[in-house]
Image: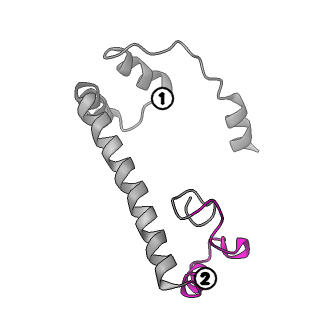
């Protein structure tokens, strides 16, 4: 988000060469070594801020929905996996859910292709 898409306070621009945005760890490390220490620190700070905010949001959701989370944990300890419908059924015991039916057919077709 920060280095590839410019989604931070650093600025709205990509901070790495698109050729280096591969999964190759060595190429990414070399690109990291070619930037200034200040820019590297700014990137680290931005990433830490994003992670920190996401962590706080997740904790707040868990605290606000503790009863539902505990029920989900109990069911998952028994079954290990849940379908989307099973997940929504459990949540509907604790909150009003919008009645939106999601069609997963396109996703299944992509997976099977």
Residue 105, disc: none
Quarter-wise, where is residue 70 in the image? top left
Quarter-wise, where is residue 24 in the image? bottom right
Q: Nearer the viewer, residue 113 or 56?
A: 56
Q: Is residue 32 magenta?
A: yes
Label 2 crowd bin: few (<14), some (14–19), many (20+), radius 10 Å: some
Q: Secondary structure at mark 2?
A: helix
User: In the picture, which quadrant includes the C terminus?
Assistant: top right
The residue shown at (23%, 30%) is 66
Residue depth check, mark 2 versus mark 1: number of the one nearer the observer: 2
Residue 108 % position (x, y): 68, 35
Residue 82 higher or lower than 88, as above or below:
below
Residue 83, disc: 1
Residue 24 higher or lower than 60, as above or below:
below
Label 1 crowd bin: few (<14), some (14–19), many (20+), radius 10 Å: few
Q: Nearer the viewer, residue 41 or 27?
A: 41
- The residue pinned by badge 2 equals 31
The residue shown at (43%, 70%) is 44
Q: Secondary structure at mark 1?
A: loop
Q: Nearer the viewer, residue 18 or 101?
A: 18
Residue 113 higher or lower than 49, as above or below:
above
Q: Which residues are magenta?
A: 11-35
Q: Earlier in the sequence, mark 2 or mark 1?
A: 2
Question: Left or right of 82: which side holds 52?
Answer: left
The residue shown at (67%, 76%) is 20
Q: Nearer the viewer, residue 58 or 81?
A: 58
Q: Is residue 18 magenta?
A: yes
């Amino acid at each position: 988000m920060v280095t590839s898409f410019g989604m931070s306070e650093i600025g709205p621009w990509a901070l790495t060469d698109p050729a280096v945005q591969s999964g190759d760890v060595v190429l990414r490390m070399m690109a990291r070594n070619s930037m200034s220490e200040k820019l590297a620190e700014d990137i680290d700070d931005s990433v830490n801020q994003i992670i920190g905010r996401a962590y706080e949001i997740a904790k707040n959701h868990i605290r606000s929905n503790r009863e539902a989370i505990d029920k989900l944990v109990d069911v998952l300890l028994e079954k290990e996996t849940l379908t989307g419908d099973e997940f929504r059924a459990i949540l509907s015991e604790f909150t009003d859910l919008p009645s939106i039916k999601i069609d997963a057919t396109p996703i299944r077709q992509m997976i099977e292709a």
